Image (cartoon, rainbow, N blue to C red):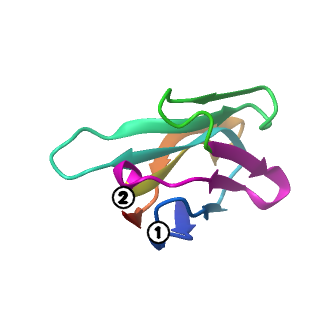
Amino acid sequence: QVQLVESGGGLVQAGGSLRLSCAASGRISRIDAMGWYRQVPGKQRELVANSTGDGSVSTKYTESVKDRFSISRDNPKNTVYLQIFNLRPEDTAVYYCNAHVWVQTGVLKWENLEVWGQGTLVTVSS
């Protein structure tokens, strides 16, 4: 019903920048939170940045990235971005987009879904 498609990952040198994009599509009534997680092989997926409400209500970042990562949303396009500055080798991971989406399932009936993207690999060389 709802898909998230990420783009923007790749190989970059330490100190460089990237912008990740994630576009949601499908029968969407409303999107609440949209955010980014990352995962390194052998480790748990961790929250990197999250944006709730209309994108301006609340954003939060994990401590290790808050001065280098910036999350933003284009609500009419159902898209969330993650701008990453001053990349470090330890930022190497698969980055996943996540969204909490309301879809209409019947007459006056809605369901809240948590949806994940397929992931985009960011590799930072030293």
Question: Which of the pair 83/37 is nearer the observer?
Answer: 83
Mark 1 and mark 2 in contact (Cβ < 8 Å)? no
Provide the secondary structure element on which disc 1 rests. Answer: strand
User: Which badge, 2 or 1, comes first in the chain's sequence?
Assistant: 1
Instruction: Assess disc 2: are there few (<14), some (14-19) or many (≥20) residues with their C-alpha within 10 Å of its C-alpha.
Output: some
Tag shown at residue 13: 1
Marks 2 and 1, Cα distance to the nearest angstrom?
16 Å
Horizontal side, residue 126 vs residue 67: left or right:
left
Residue bearing the label numbered 2: 94
Q: What residue type is labelled 1?
A: Gln
Residue 19 quadrant:
bottom right
Instruction: Assess disc 1: are there few (<14), some (14-19) or many (≥20) residues with their C-alpha within 10 Å of its C-alpha.
Output: some
Q: What residue type is labelled 2?
A: Val
Q: Give the answer, above or below, for where 42 lies relative to 111.
A: below
Tag shown at residue 49: none
Residue under the point 56% across and 71% down: 8
Where is residue 125 shown, x and y percent of the image? 37, 67
Asked whether residue 106 is in view, the answer is no
Residue 77 quadrant:
bottom right
Where is residue 81 shown, x and y percent of the image? 67, 55
Q: Does the magenta stretch include residue 80?
A: yes
Question: Which of the pair 116/9 is nearer the observer?
Answer: 9
Horizontal side, residue 55 vs residue 89: left or right:
right
Segment colored magenta: 69-91
Where is residue 9 shown, x and y percent of the image? 49, 69
Where is residue 74 shown, x and y percent of the image? 80, 54
Residue under the point 36% across and 63% down: 126
- Of tags 2 and 1, which is closer to the observer? 1
Provide the secondary structure element on which disc 2 rests. Answer: strand
Report how many numbered discs are placed on residues in the image. 2
Residue under the point 50% across and 26% down: 63
Residue under the point 25% across and 38% down: 44
